[in-house]
Amino acid sequence: KAKEFAGNCYQLFSSDIENQAVEQIQLENDLFKALQKGNEFELYYQPKFDARTNDLIGMESLIRWNHPELGTLSPGHFIPLAEETGLITLLGEWVIRQACKQMKIWEEAGYTELIISANLSPQQFNQKEIVQVVADILHETDLPPYHLELELTENLIIHNTEQTLKTIGELKGLGIQISIDDFGTGYSSLGYLKDFPVDTLKIDKSFIDDVTTNKKNAAITKTIITLADSLGVNVIAEGVEQAEQAVFLAQHGCHWIQGFYYSQPLPTKTFERHFLKSYSQRS
Ligand code: C2E
Ligand code: MG
Ligand code: MG
Ligand code: MG
């Protein structure tokens, strides 16, 4: 009996793994094809606001894949695959180009103060040509560089510090902004902050979630805000879902704020309708 049971278990387990592998390979093929076609990816935009005045200050670009059979896929479903297969380089380049093109359109419509951000995965950051890629896209889209921000994660900084420092310096040299995404969740020491010319710290959602009820997360959040102020850099909170969180953050001097409480990430037209009203009425 026991043996039979164990046998079944194994079979279940093994066919599960096989299915997963088949699905992954299928998705990998689809990803490759989608990159060649180029029209299945879309950027959604989530607004960022000044915590004190509630003014719109910019937006984060978040990629979606409109898969012909599977529907709209979130980055969690395909970014890791793109990273494993190296396709992230092409995909990431598409993201930066698309974000710059869109920001150029908004800039020409009179939104001359907004900053658009794009997420950069470690593999993409570590490709040799990244600085040239960004420089070419800025040139090609004719976007003034201060409109572009790249969101990097802390973990990228612990590897190969010297090269990382050089790359960030060169990216800054282009005139763009750099932020540290998911700040506080990485494994790096704070020491890097004195060397790396970053513009913004983005407090991770995990601290914000219970910032109004958990004393420790409140303390961490306040400390990050103070740290940012002492370093003379900007600070934004991500994942703000409740009014109380927004109030807490504004009260403690967090500069900027982003989250479902204000808006989910939205497709271009919807974003324009909600947040760029004067522009969408004209067009
Ligand atoms: P992230 O850069 O930390 O982005 C924040 C994620 O949290 C987004 O999920 C966003 O939709 C979600 N979010 C924002 N506000 C709230 C909130 O109030 N509550 C909750 N529950 N969630 C909120 P999304 O779009 O699924 O992206 C997940 C991650 O995928 C991103 O995390 C980023 O690391 C990565 N990603 C997204 N787009 C790109 C891209 O174009 N390139 C690369 N390399 N990575 C990307
Ligand atoms: Mg981000
Ligand atoms: Mg984040
Ligand atoms: Mg996050």
Image (spheres, helix red, strand yellow):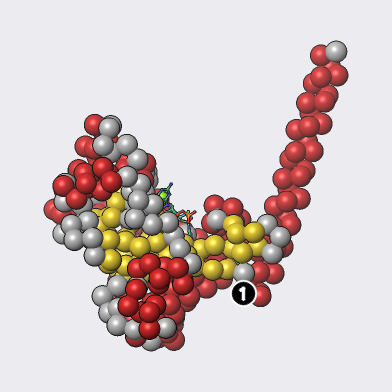
The image shows residue 161, relative to residue 210, as above or below, that is below
Seen at 34% across and 84% down, the residue is 109
Residue beneath the point at 54% across and 52% down: 76
In this view, the residue in front, 262 or 105, is 262
For residue 139, above or below residue 39: below
Residue sticking out furthest to the front: 281
Whether residue 262 is situated above or below residue 109 in the rendered picture: above
Dividing the image into 4 quarters, which one contains the N terminus?
A: top right
Quadrant placement of the C terminus:
bottom left
Disc 1 element: loop
Q: Residue furthest top?
A: 1
Left or right relative to 234: residue 18:
right
- How many neighbours does mark 1 have within 10 angstroms: few (below 14), some (14-19), or many (20 or more)? few
- Identified at 29% across, 72% down, the residue is 114
Q: In this view, does 68 lie to the left or right of 87?
A: right
Q: Residue at 31% of width from left, 61% of height from top?
A: 48
Q: Position of residue 165 (x, y in %)?
A: 32, 63
Q: Front-most of 248 and 76?
A: 248
Place residue 179 in its image quadrant.
Answer: bottom left
Asked if residue 163 can be seen in this view, the reply is no
Query: Within the image, what quadrant is residue 201 found in?
Result: bottom left
The furthest residue to the left: 230
The image shows residue 184 at horizontal and vertical percentages of 32, 45
Residue denoted by label 1: 38
Spot occupied by residue 55 in the image (x, y as percentages of width and height): 24, 65
**Please, what is the three-letter code of the amino acid marked with disc 1?**
Gly
The reply to whether residue 262 is in sight is yes
**Residue 182 image point, x, y percent:** 36, 50
